[in-house]
Image: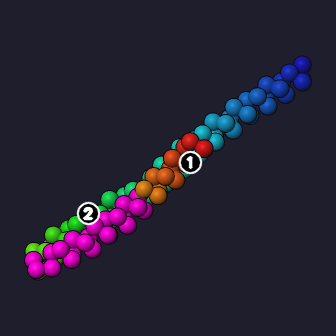
Amino acid sequence: MRRNSLIVVLYLFKLTTTKMLAAAKYLGAGLACSGLIGAGAGIGLIFSSLISSTARNPQVRSQLFNFAILGFALAEATGLFSLMIAFLLLYS
């Protein structure tokens, strides 16, 4: 009788740890996606600065646009890296 109850306890413990690991994966993926907030704010800041700079000095529009596209790519890359980490946490 005691052996059967021990088997039941071990089985329930295994189920509990499996569910805890799944919950930890979801929490980690959610926290990793918080990097997307910074990427969105950075992209908005880059293009708002581009608009105000172009309004102040329209002659350097093409040069400013090139810098803005470079800044956009770097800000978007950080967001994509955090999204990639989230997917790695979920599906590995």
**Residue 74 inside the magenta-drawn segment:** yes
Task: Tell me the chief SS of the magenta region.
Answer: helix
Residue 67 lies in quadrant: bottom left
Label disc, if present, on residue 89 of the rendered structure: 1
Q: State the residue at coordinates (86%, 21%).
A: 4
- The kind of residue on which mark 1 rests is Leu
Point 28% across, 67% down: residue = 69
Residue 27 picture location, percent across and down = 53, 47
Give the residue number, with chain letter if any, for mark 2. Answer: 44
Rendered location of residue 16, percent (x, y) = 68, 35
The three-letter amino acid code for the residue at tag 2 is: Gly
Q: Specify start and end residues of the magenta stretch as a single range.
A: 58-79
Name which residue lies at 31% across and 65% down: 72
Q: Is residue 28 left or right of residue 8?
A: left
Q: Secondary structure at mark 2?
A: helix
In the image: residue 42, left or right of residue 23: left
